[in-house]
Image: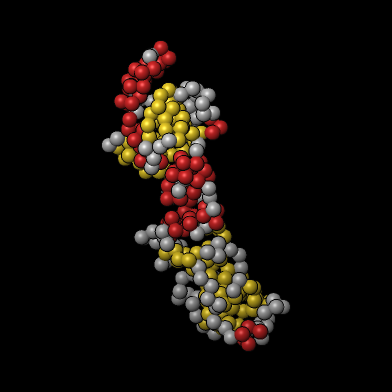
C-alpha cells in the first residue's frame, strides 16, 4: 500500500472534510509560481496589514488579501503609501506583479480567475478566510466551498510532515498463525501446549489498528482468515510514520522474536481464546496455556 492508500483506509482521514485537510499543518499542495515549483501550505501567520483584492473564480466573488512580500518588489516600494496611489495604477501594478500568484490560484482551484478590483477591507472577514502561504507570500482567501473542495484533498497532504507521522495506532504483534480444529479449541485446557514452529524462523508481523499488516514485505490490508493467532500479551504503539516507511520501496520493519517466558494471547477472529507464556517443549517453542476463556 502507498501512503495515500493507507490514509484513505483510516476512518479519521477518510472522513476528513476538505476544511480539515486545508487547515491541517500537513497540508502541502505542489504548485507552480511562474517558473518556480513551490508548495502551497496552510499559513502559520495571519497578516494584519494586507492589500485586499476583489476577484472571481468563474462567476463566484472572492476576496484575496495579500501581505507585504519581497516577491512583489514594486508593490513593496509603494506599500506604505499605497493608499495614495490611484486605484487604476495600483491595480495595473497588481496585475503585473501578482499575475503568477493569480495563475497559481486559477490552476489550484481549477476555475478561471478574474481580478475585479480593490476590495473593501471588511468585505471578507478573517473568520471566513483560509490562510495560506506559498514561498514568502502570505495571503488569505475567501473560505468558499469552491476553494476548499479543490484544495482539501488527501493527496495534498505532506506524508513527511512531522505532525502527520507522529499520529499513533495500536498494533498487535503476531508471532504465529495457524489453523486449529474446532474440537481442539473447545477442549483447550490449562497446561496444554501448542507448538509454534514460526518462533525463531519467521519474523513477527504487526496487525495495525485491525486494518493493516506491516512486515518486511511492506504494508497490506489486513484480511481475517479464520486462523488462530498467537499475539504478544500487550499491543505496541506504531506511528503513522512507521507505516509510511514500511510501505516504502526499502521497507525496514524492526521486529524481534518473543523471548522464553514472554506473555502471550491466543485469539481467533478477534475473540480471546487463551492466555499463556512462551516456553519450550523439548527443543520446540511452544505456547503453554495458563488460562482459557469460558466461551471458546
Q: Is residue 24 in view from this perspective? A: no
The residue at 42%/30% (across/down) is 55
Q: Is residue 296 visible?
A: yes
Q: Quadrant of residue 233?
A: bottom right
Quadrant in which residue 127 is drawn: top right
User: Where residue 122 sits in the image (x, y, percent)?
Assistant: 53, 24
Residue 133 x, y percent position in the rendering: 42, 34
Horizontal side, residue 115 vs residue 26: left or right: left
Q: Residue at x 64, y 73 (%)?
A: 272
Q: Nearer the viewer, residue 46 or 179?
A: 46
Q: Residue at x 37, y 31 (%)?
A: 114
Residue 294 lies, in percent from the top left, at 72, 78
Q: Quadrant of the C terminus?
A: bottom right
Vertical order, 66 against 265 (above or below): above
Pick the front one: 263 or 226: 226
Residue at the far top: name it.
84
In this view, the residue farthest toward the left is 35
For the point 51% across and 33% down, the residue is: 129
Q: Which quarter of the rendering shows the N terminus?
A: bottom left
Amino acid at each position: 500500500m502507498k501512503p495515500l492508500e493507507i490514509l484513505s483506509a483510516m476512518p479519521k482521514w477518510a472522513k476528513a472534510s476538505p476544511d480539515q485537510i486545508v487547515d491541517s499543518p500537513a497540508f502541502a499542495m505542489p504548485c507552480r509560481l511562474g517558473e518556480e515549483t513551490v508548495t502551497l501550505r496552510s499559513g502559520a501567520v495571519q497578516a494584519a496589514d494586507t492589500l485586499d483584492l476583489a476577484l472571481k473564480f468563474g462567476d463566484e466573488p472572492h476576496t484575496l488579501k495579500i501581505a507585504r512580500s519581497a516577491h512583489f518588489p514594486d508593490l513593496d516600494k509603494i506599500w506604505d503609501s499605497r493608499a495614495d496611489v490611484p486605484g487604476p495604477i495600483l491595480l495595473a501594478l497588481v496585475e503585473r506583479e501578482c499575475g503568477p500568484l493569480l495563475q497559481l490560484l486559477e490552476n489550484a482551484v481549477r476555475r478561471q480567475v478574474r481580478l475585479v478590483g480593490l476590495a473593501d477591507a471588511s468585505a471578507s472577514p478573517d473568520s471566513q478566510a483560509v490562510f495560506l502561504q506559498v514561498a514568502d507570500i502570505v495571503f488569505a482567501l475567501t473560505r468558499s466551498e469552491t476553494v476548499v473542495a479543490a484544495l482539501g484533498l488527501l493527496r495534498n497532504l505532506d506524508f513527511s510532515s512531522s505532525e502527520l507521522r507522529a499520529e499513533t495506532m495500536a498494533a498487535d504483534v503476531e508471532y504465529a498463525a495457524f489453523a486449529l480444529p474446532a474440537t481442539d479449541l473447545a477442549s483447550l485446557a490449562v497446561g496444554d501446549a501448542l507448538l509454534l514452529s514460526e518462533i525463531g524462523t519467521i519474523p513477527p508481523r504487526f496487525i495495525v489498528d485491525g486494518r493493516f499488516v506491516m512486515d518486511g514485505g511492506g504494508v497490506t490490508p489486513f484480511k481475517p482468515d479464520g486462523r488462530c493467532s498467537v499475539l504478544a500479551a500487550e499491543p505496541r504503539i506504531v506511528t503513522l510514520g512507521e507505516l509510511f516507511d514500511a510501505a516504502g520501496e526499502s521497507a525496514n520493519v524492526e521486529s524481534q522474536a518473543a523471548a522464553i517466558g514472554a506473555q502471550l494471547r491466543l485469539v481467533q477472529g478477534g475473540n480471546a481464546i487463551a492466555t499463556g507464556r512462551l516456553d519450550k517443549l523439548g527443543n520446540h517453542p511452544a505456547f503453554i496455556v495458563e488460562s482459557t476463556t469460558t466461551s471458546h
